[in-house]
Image (cartoon, rainbow, N blue to C red):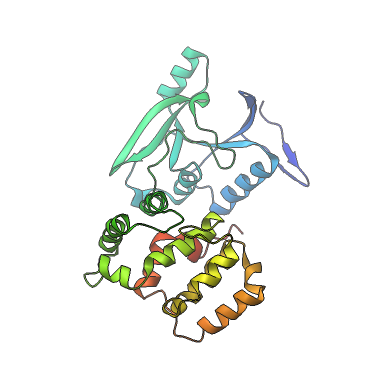
Amino acid sequence: MVDEYVVHGDSRRRPDVRAIYDGKPIAIEIQLATTQIPIIIAREDFYRREGRHLIWLTWNFVPVERAHLLTAFEDIFYSHNKNLFSLDDAVVSESRERGALLVRAFWEHGDGWNSKITTLLDLEWPSSGLPYAVAPPPAWHDAFRARWLAATTVHGTPWAARKELYSELAEKLGDDSIDASMLEETDIGALLNAILSFVEGKPVGSRQGNLTELINTFLASERRFRFARIMRKVITVTGTSELLDKPSVAAKFSRAMQDAQDGPESHTGRVALLLFSELFEKRKSAS
């Protein structure tokens, strides 16, 4: 159905196409090279609130190096889980022959792009976020965190697995002064398990029964006092800041913060930023 408004509260949008497809309410918007980022964000927010799946379509997209990708296209590229959808004469012709709406999906592969013609039915439709055709490989830090978690039990992370992961982490940091032994000596493994505990919402690598017990035990060791500022940030960002008001936790932080703290330029800070950038980097505003 076209040329009708979608209304949500006091807001309304007129998508280029709206329909019920395979039982899902969808909206299709044509993305122009001149579409501004605030408009893109506003439309995505509107359709999310309205409970309608949004698909951005370009016309006759020509793959280019990422450095030369137009800003408007780059934004929808990330919205669609690093996919772009386009129409062209060949896709339109095949759509008419098959009597179904087809799109050409583009995704990055190595240093270039891959593409395929696909139906909307064959797309992945996540419960939140925009649909995509091909999921990108997991980012290195996500894969590392998954392997660390897989190797970790309530008794901690075994040294054999820890050493191998430390070596990989040290290589990724690209600093000759940092190796597996140095990471072990500075108790990075305990810090990773503490951060992961708050990311996962439960103790990781610990027999403690809850996060309050975990952070109290973690900061009971003087050698970990320098991690207090990092952990305060983690606790705040992961939505568990009420723990900081508990007398036992407040006392632990008060004592630990009296010592010098590891900052972002320290090897500890670099590890935290490399593995948990979403916790420490400022998010782009949608306003």
Residue 76 at x, y percent in the picture: 49, 45
Residue at figure coordinates x 41%, y 78% from the top left: 223
The single residue placed furthest to the bottom in the displayed view is 258
Residue 127 at x, y percent in the picture: 59, 38
Residue 236 at x, y percent in the picture: 59, 67
Residue at figure coordinates x 70%, y 40% from the top left: 50
Residue at figure coordinates x 48%, y 64% from the top left: 194
The foreground one among 120 and 31 is 120
Quarter of the image that includes the C terminus? bottom right
Q: Is residue 112 left or right of residue 87?
A: left
The single residue placed furthest to the left in the displayed view is 176
Q: Is residue 203 above or below residue 45?
A: below
Q: Is residue 264 above or below residue 91?
A: below
Occupied quadrant, residue 22: top right
Q: Is residue 283 left or right of residue 66?
A: right
Q: Is residue 104 above or below residue 94?
A: below
Residue 145 at x, y percent in the picture: 40, 54
